[in-house]
Image (cartoon, rainbow, N blue to C red):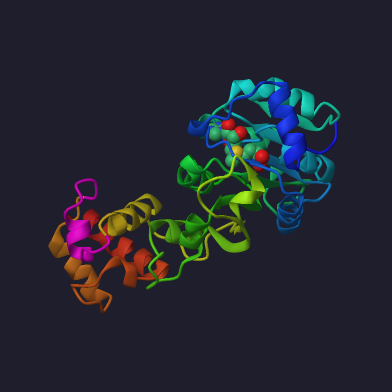
Amino acid sequence: MSKLSNPKETIAVVSQYDFDFRKRFGQNFLVDEGVILRALEAAQVGEEDVIFEIGPGIGTLTQYLCEAAHSVAAIEIDRKLIPILEDTLKKYDNVRIINEDVLKTDLLDLAREYEAGRMNQPGQKHLLKIVANLPYYITTPILMALMQQRVPAQSVTVMVQKEVADRMTARPGSKDYGSLSIAVQYYSRPQIVEIVPPESFIPRPKVTSAVVRMELYEEPPVEPADEKLFIAITRAAFEQRRKTLVNALGSNQALSCSKDSIREALEKMGKSPSVRGEALSMEEFIQLSDLLSAAQTQA
Ligand code: SAM
């Protein structure tokens, strides 16, 4: 079978199997070889690498991954795509097709099976990298799961909506800066690799896309005393971004921080009590989270 990375081959496979694209699974298949090759280069896929691909679709990107990497585990939720993948990938003996919802897959366990570990660990032969054209409807839950579960990947290279890529890489004070920017930048060093137009997919999505490469930190450079509280605080701070931090955090039931304790913490940080979340850097959110965590312990 020839490569699927062009409209003609993709349409041929889709018609051969009478496959109906399912919008609810975010199915937009890549038909642009240039984009695939540049994503592979950005991910620096090498012959000892183990790749986890999320949402292989009909196997377009997977074909290239199989040729460049040691092995590939491709996790696809749509059971109608499984016989297609078995056909389009039949010439590769280094791929495993897993018919599961990635949000329910134990990726740590899967990594262990492949003995794929973090960079620089003694005795580790294989580096784990994640490469995917993500289903856009669950981009944030997938990214958060990969990062918070500390899936031992060296890097994550993903196609996302451009608007999400802008949020992932935004700096404090910009309109795109929010809880996703802080979470992504806490766990990794993100970089936009390429902007991708709707014409690079079948069917065409309504939005522009972007490839983002995140190099995951083995240990975050700055760590809060309570990581869960830190993430919860950043979420609450941007849920209603026009509110001051005192009001946004103080009125959040899940946090149980009094407005007085928040004012006190901000004062210790030399911040105005009317400051908003968008003005605080990630390091300042960590400081705030540590002060509030200490206040909760004392109470
Ligand atoms: N990788 C293919 C490509 O680039 O042509 C397809 C990418 S398409 C944007 C997203 C893929 O993710 C679809 O095949 C879809 O069925 C799959 N998908 C959606 N939700 C999923 C989930 N929860 N777990 C695993 N795969 C999922």
- The quarter of the image that holds ligand 1 is top right
Q: Position of residue 262 (x, y in %)?
A: 20, 64
For the question of whether residue 120 can be seen, the reply is no
Q: In the rendered view, does 119 fall on the left or right side of 219?
A: right
Q: Principal SS element in the magenta part? A: loop
- The quarter holding residue 235 reads bottom left
- As rendered, which of 162 and 287 lies closer to the eye? 162
Question: Where, quadrant-wise, is the C terminus in this rendering?
Answer: bottom left
Q: Quadrant of residue 62?
A: top right
Residue 56: horizontal and vertical position, in percent?
Answer: 66, 35
Q: Which residues are magenta?
A: 241-255
From the viewer's perspective, tell me whether residue 106 is left or right of residue 226. right
298 sits left or right of 190 in the view: left
Q: Nearer the viewer, residue 267 or 42?
A: 42
183 or 111, which is in the foreground? 183
Total residue callouts: 0
Please tell me whether residue 19 is drawn above or below residue 231 in the rendered image: above
Instruction: Locate residue 261, reporting x and y percent.
Output: 17, 63
Q: Is residue 113 magenta?
A: no
The structure residue drawn at horizontal position 66% and vertical position 49%, both measured from the top left corner, is 200
Residue drawn 71% across the image and 33% down it: 11
Residue 99 locus on image (x, y percent): 62, 24
In the picture, measured across the screen, residue 297 lies left or right of residue 8, that is: left
Q: Quadrant of residue 75?
A: top right
| Viewer can see residue 166 | yes
Which residue in the rendered view is the most extreme toward the bottom?
270
Vertical placement of residue 35 versus 80, above or below: below
If the image is split into quadrants, where does the N terminus sit?
top right
